[in-house]
Amino acid sequence: MSIIFSEKDNTFILHTKDTTYQMKVDRYGFLLHLYYGRRTEGNMEYLLRYADRGFSGNPYDAGTDRTYSMDALPQELPCQGTGDYRSPAVIVKNTDGSYGCDFRYRGHQIREGKYHIEGLPAVYADEGRGETLEIHLEDPVTKVQITLLYGVLSDLDIITRSARIRNSGGGKIYLEKVQAACLDWLYGEYDLISFYGRHAMERNVQRIPVAHGAHVIGSRRGTSSHQYNPMMILAGHETTEDAGSCYAMSFVYSGGFKGEVEKDQFNQTRALLGLSDELFSYPLETGEVFHVPEVVLTYSSQGLSKLSHNLHRCYREHLCRGKYKDAHRPVLLNSWEASYFDFHGDSIYELAKQAADLGIEMLVMDDGWFGKRDDDNSGLGDWFVNEQKLGESLGSLVERIRALGLKFGIWLEPECVNEDSELYREHPDWVLAVPGRNPVRARNQLVLDFSRKEVVDYIYEKVCNVLDQGKIEYVKWDMNRSLSDCFSRNTPDQGRVLHDYVLGLYDFLERLIGRYPDLLLEGCSGGGGRFDAGMLYYTPQIWCSDNTDALDRVRIQYGTSFGYPVSSVGSHVSAVPNHQTGRLTPLRTRGVTAMAGTFGYELDLGSLLEVEKEQIREQIREYLQHEDLIRNGRYYRLTDPFREEAGAWEFVSEDGREVLVGAVMQEIHGNMTVTYLRLKGLNPGQWYQEQKSGDIFASDALMEAGIPLPEQSGEYRAYQMYFKMVEA
């Protein structure tokens, strides 16, 4: 068993292959955190120290013992109202209007298999692959109960945390703050690594020392956001890619979130991750249950690469679902940058013919095929095919394209609506809007109230009517604005609206993949505005960024790789000058960069030269040759593109026999210095042949001394090297 309870000292021990997580029920029924780190044996309670701390209160149970204070003890569930003045994980407003809760141990269960969460995405694992620990706590005064859920995937060094909160008292309560996971460290100096950004430049990497006070990241936007990703890493100051201790916390949720890291008066560090508490005041009537979204935890004593590998494998194998979890993802061409809104059925068909000639496998018709939709000011929400614009039915167009040997996909944005639409004119009360105030527009659109079941049901029915018109095998699910005006006409408790909106979104997606099990869903929110583990439960790939500039993508995909597998990264080759930056980069460079993702194209094929078309044919052949290695191999970051002249990365097969290296020179200077790449993850004492040159290298030499990139003039050169292990 990976989960052990010692009745002798009331201690829970969660073992994974390389890590140990330990906690204890103390003499007063509080659940104290003892240890999380490299695997160890023995009771870690000896680490706790008690002293009379001035201005740190003591539970009444402790009597005159002033050395016992929740203000200094490490906890699994720190709550407001127990004398702990650090940031709490849970705040409850009680029936009588008072604030506070005091949860004490009441029992536990251990069982095979990983828990699931009703209505929410979560890591899954059957018996033999995962175990569950449930710890039951209760407030003895209000009778509010909370069950802490721990999932253990031992082979992956993954521990997950969630909770169920039940109001078993006599009246309505409000949850004012709910964080899914708390980690308390008694000592240590750490850096916080977080991932910030903006639209078209997501997941930049920031690494700062944890100092006294609190550092907070999060999203108030109703989505996980471009601005901060719902994942953070705590690492030792000296931790590198290949050595040192580090912890990851990743939120399996697609709405507003809050991450906090606080160093307290006693040099202890607390990290919390969970729901945003702004505009959050969730009501629970007697008998009702609130399911807390999940946080995934993992620890590495071998640096950041191992930490990422743990998350990558967990998400590939135990979060993504459906046909395309393991199947080949078709190389696609999206029509957006080829034609924007200016297209008709024949022009889409012509684009498909050109795509088929190049070896592309799927044609995706982007925005503009529905309602009165010739720009982004009208028609959104009217999910019926504009046959006048297409010049034919959708079914007819799909069949024509499929006859070319291509699959067919479309773009959708089901969560939003234009005021200039039939839907809005018929149901203006279906949008999120504050009565008596003009709404805030973004991209000239409003947000539909997905916290209301009738709204979700209506849009779901309309979308299904479209998907039933032909064999549509791919949907790009977009969401092109943040939420504001967060008022629903459907509830007197507005503090529940943002969370209920996310539940409505998940309900829609769950029904969609249930009805169309062969459908490939790609998530998108203006690119990477909802790139989170929650969406991966429904969409095995997410459009990484609306920015397709190859140089910017090197950095965006670098930041993304810390928490998410390459198989989830939607990445395409686009035209030059790039439509977002105006930059000119070689087609080779755009291809090498996009191959560190699901791979596809986003350009006007009719404007290409013949030599460029042949390059695309070769790119597709190259990608298909290496697709399994790219999708399932161990991913290594070889350089830091925010600091070094080259951005470089590597894929290594699980058996270490195949290696694919990609690199992009981000700068060029006169009398250029040589860039050496030290490879990682090769089998020691073996020999590897670079397949293009035929040169053979010792694996230890490649890992210790590295390999020089060829010296070439010209801006933004890219290199791809493929090695196979050979007999000496």
Image (cartoon, rainbow, N blue to C red):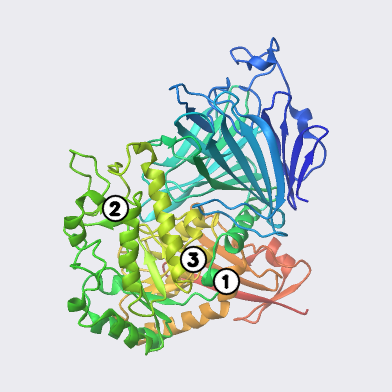
Percent coordinates x, y for residue 175 in the rendering: 46, 33
Along the line of sight, which residue is nearer the eye, 243 or 198?
198
Q: Nearer the viewer, mark 3 or mark 2?
A: 2
Give the alpha-carbon distance from disc 3 to disc 2, as whole Å.
42 Å
Q: Give the distance between the C-alpha atoms of the residues marked 1 and 2, in whole angstroms.
A: 34 Å
Instruction: Name the residue beneath numbered marker 2.
Output: 448
Disc 2 is placed on an element classified as loop
Q: Secondary structure at mark 3?
A: strand
**Marks 3 and 2, the one that precedes in the sequence:** 2
Of labels 3 and 1, earlier in sequence is: 1
Left or right: 664, with 377 as reference point: right
Q: Residues within 10 Å of mark 3 (few under 14, many from 20)?
A: many
Q: Amino acid at mark 1?
A: Asp
What residue is drawn where x is 42% and y is 53%? 202
Q: Position of residue 326 (x, y in %)?
A: 57, 71
* Residue 369 figure quarter: bottom left
Residue under numbered circle 3: 664
Numbered marks: total: 3
Is mark 3 in CB contact (under 8 Å) with mark 2?
Answer: no
The residue shown at (71%, 70%) is 655
Q: Residues within 10 Å of mark 1 (few under 14, many from 20)?
A: some
Quadrant holding the C terminus: bottom right
Query: SS at mark 1?
Result: loop
Q: Residue at x 57, y 42 (%)?
A: 163
Instruction: Specify the label residue 466 is tagged with.
Output: none
- Position of 705 with respect to 182 (left or right) is right
| Among the two numbered marks 1 and 2 on one chain, the one whose residue lies closer to the N terminus | 1
The residue indicated by pointer 1 is 326
Q: Residue at x 53, y 72 (%)?
A: 323
Three-letter residue code for mark 2:
Leu
